[in-house]
Structure formats: C-alpha cells, structure tokens
Image (cartoon, rainbow, N blue to C red):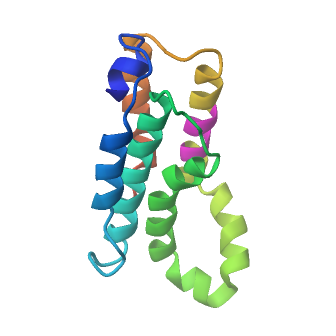
C-alpha cells in the first residue's frame, strides 16, 4: 500500500484498521532486550508513518524523523558507552552529530524530505533508489 501510494500507482485511502493492527503489534520494552525492542518499535512506527502518508486521514508528525534515526542512535550509544561514561550524555549528544554514520543518516533524511516536499509521489526508479539509500538508517550493529 505504501509503495503504491509513494509511486503514484494508487491514491490515498483508509488504512485505519491496518494502523490499529500495527499499533497492537508494537513490543513493549520487556518483550525484547535492548536495543532490539527499540528497533522493532521504531520500525513499526515508521511503517505507520508511511500508512498515514497514504491515508485520507493523514496527519504527519515531525517526531517521526526522530523515530527513523532512533535505532541508529541506540546502536551508537551502545558502541560509545565508554565515551558516555567518561564525558557524559551532553558531550556525546553533541559529538555524535559529527559521526560519519549519523551524518549519512541525517543527510539521507534531508535529501528525501527535499525530494518529497514537491509532491505526493515519486517515480518507481526514485522510490527504489530511496529504499536502497535508506540502508544508512540501519543500526551499525545489525
């Protein structure tokens, strides 16, 4: 459904039932160990965001950009635990934005937003390229 909408094959429709099923499938923190619970929650939230974009009741939320970055952030926090312990969360939060991995993820999101802000759909080739480029959002440890 998301693919069809994104590529202009289909228009917006009611995805309320599917969104409700997705919401019910989100694991709680106790269901999976860290960081996998975060990864699963954010993947489902991002799928929900795609369904919202393809829905007649579309109300997009800027926080979804953070959810797209959160699995990468979680894996980087685990990777940088010694730095966080020695220099603190504030230092790490500033330093991580200069990390090449995070810079690539943020650049991908900025470029995608710029490409999508001009209309509701992109062509099939552009959509497939965006999917391939989205690999920068995958956690570094996966």
Q: Extreme bottom residue here?
A: 86
Residue 27, magenta (yes or no): no
**Which residue is more in the foreground, 32 or 20?**
20
**Which residue is more in the foreground, 83 or 27?**
27
Left or right side of 106 for 9 = left
**Which residue is more in the foreground, 76 or 124?**
124
Task: Name which quarter of the figure residue 35 lies in.
Answer: bottom left
Percent of width and height locating residue 97: 66, 57
Task: Name which quarter of the figure residue 134 lies in.
Answer: top left
Badge count:
0
Percent of width and height locating residue 46: 43, 46
Left or right side of 70 for 93 = right
Q: Please say if 1 is above or below 63.
A: above
Residue 109, magenta (yes or no): yes
Question: Which residue is at 63% across, 89% downward?
Answer: 86
Write down the region rendered in magenta: 105-110
Percent of width and height locating residue 62: 65, 46
Residue 29 visible within the image: yes
Left or right side of 32 for 110 = right
Percent of width and height locating residue 67: 52, 54
Residue 142 visible within the image: no
Q: Quadrant of the C terminus?
A: bottom left
Question: Which residue is at 45% across, 75% downward?
Answer: 78
């Amino acid at each position: 459904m998301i693919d069809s909408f994104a590529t202009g094959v289909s228009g917006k429709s009611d995805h309320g039932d599917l969104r409700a099923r997705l919401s019910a499938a989100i694991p709680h923190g106790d269901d999976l160990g860290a960081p996998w619970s975060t990864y699963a929650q954010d993947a489902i939230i991002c799928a929900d965001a795609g369904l919202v974009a393809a829905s007649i009741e579309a109300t997009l939320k800027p926080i979804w950009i953070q959810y797209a970055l959160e699995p990468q952030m979680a894996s980087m926090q685990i990777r940088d635990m010694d730095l966080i312990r020695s220099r603190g969360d504030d230092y790490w939060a500033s330093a991580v934005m200069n990390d090449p991995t995070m810079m690539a993820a943020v650049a991908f999101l900025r470029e995608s937003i710029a490409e999508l802000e001009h209309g509701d759909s992109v062509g099939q080739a552009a959509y497939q390229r965006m999917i391939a480029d989205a690999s920068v959002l995958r956690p570094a440890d996966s």
